[in-house]
Structure formats: structure tokens, C-alpha cells
Amino acid sequence: MNSIRRTATELPTSSDTDFCEIFFVKAGHSYTFRYKSGSERHLISSLLDTALDPHMNLDLEDVRKLVEALGLGSFIQPASGT
């Protein structure tokens, strides 16, 4: 992964609702994820879905690095052993 950038923007179509965007580039591919502030769990889920898609150039290690860089590690809970 070459770069990660996170921005918070106000979308003109929604009043008083903050959205965040994550942009990053890996091996010439650009990725953008937009999520509503407070919906970080959905962001992580989308990142994981993308990493598991064999047609995408994103892997689980990339997701780990993104989550760590964005300070979202507290949203990940270890799987329970059942």
C-alpha cells in the first residue's frame, strides 16, 4: 500500500450528517470507501469483503494495516472459540 488518506466531508445532499472517506492506492489500483461517521464497523466489514474478493487487489494484511493506521482497532473483536 502506497498511501492512505482519510478525510471528513459534509455531503451537500444530507444536512448535518458527517461522512468520512478513505482513499488508498496499491499497485496502481485506487480504492475509495465512504462511510457515515459512527459506522466504522460497516467500513471494516466492507474492507474485509473487498479483501476476500478474488477480483480485487486488496488482502487481509492491507485491511489490518488500514484499520491500524485509522485507529479503528478497537472496533475489531476476536472471534470466540466455540
Image (tube, helix red, strand yellow):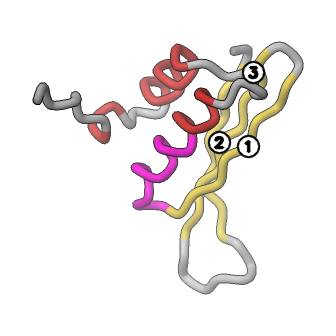
Residue 8: where, in percent of width, then height? 60, 55
Mark 1: which secondary structure? strand
**Circle 3/circle 1 CB separation < 8 Å:** no
Label located before the other in sequence (3 or 2): 2
Q: Is residue 22 magenta?
A: no
Characterize the local packing of mark 3: few (<14), some (14-19) or many (20 or more) Cα atoms within 10 angstroms.
Answer: some
Give me the residue at 65% from left, 42% from top.
22
**Circle 1/circle 2 CB separation < 8 Å:** yes
Q: Is residue 28 above or below residue 7?
A: above
Q: Amino acid at mark 1?
A: Thr
Magenta span: helix, strand or loop, mainly? helix
Give me the residue at 85% from left, 25% from top.
29
Label located before the other in sequence (3 or 1): 1
Residue located farthest toward the right when viewing the structure as drawn: 28
Mark 2: which secondary structure? strand
Q: Amino acid at mark 3?
A: Asn
Q: CA distance from mark 1 to mark 2?
A: 5 Å
Residue 41: where, in percent of width, then height? 40, 50
Magenta region, residue range: 37-46
Residue located farthest toward the left when viewing the structure as drawn: 82
What residue does disc 2 label?
22
Give me the residue at 60% from left, 27% from top.
51
Mark 3: which secondary structure? loop
What residue does disc 1 label?
32
Q: CA distance from mark 3 to mark 2?
A: 16 Å
Q: Camera-side residue: 24 or 41?
A: 41
Residue 57 is marked as 3
Q: CA distance from mark 3 to mark 1?
A: 13 Å
What is the quadrant of the C terminus in the image? top left
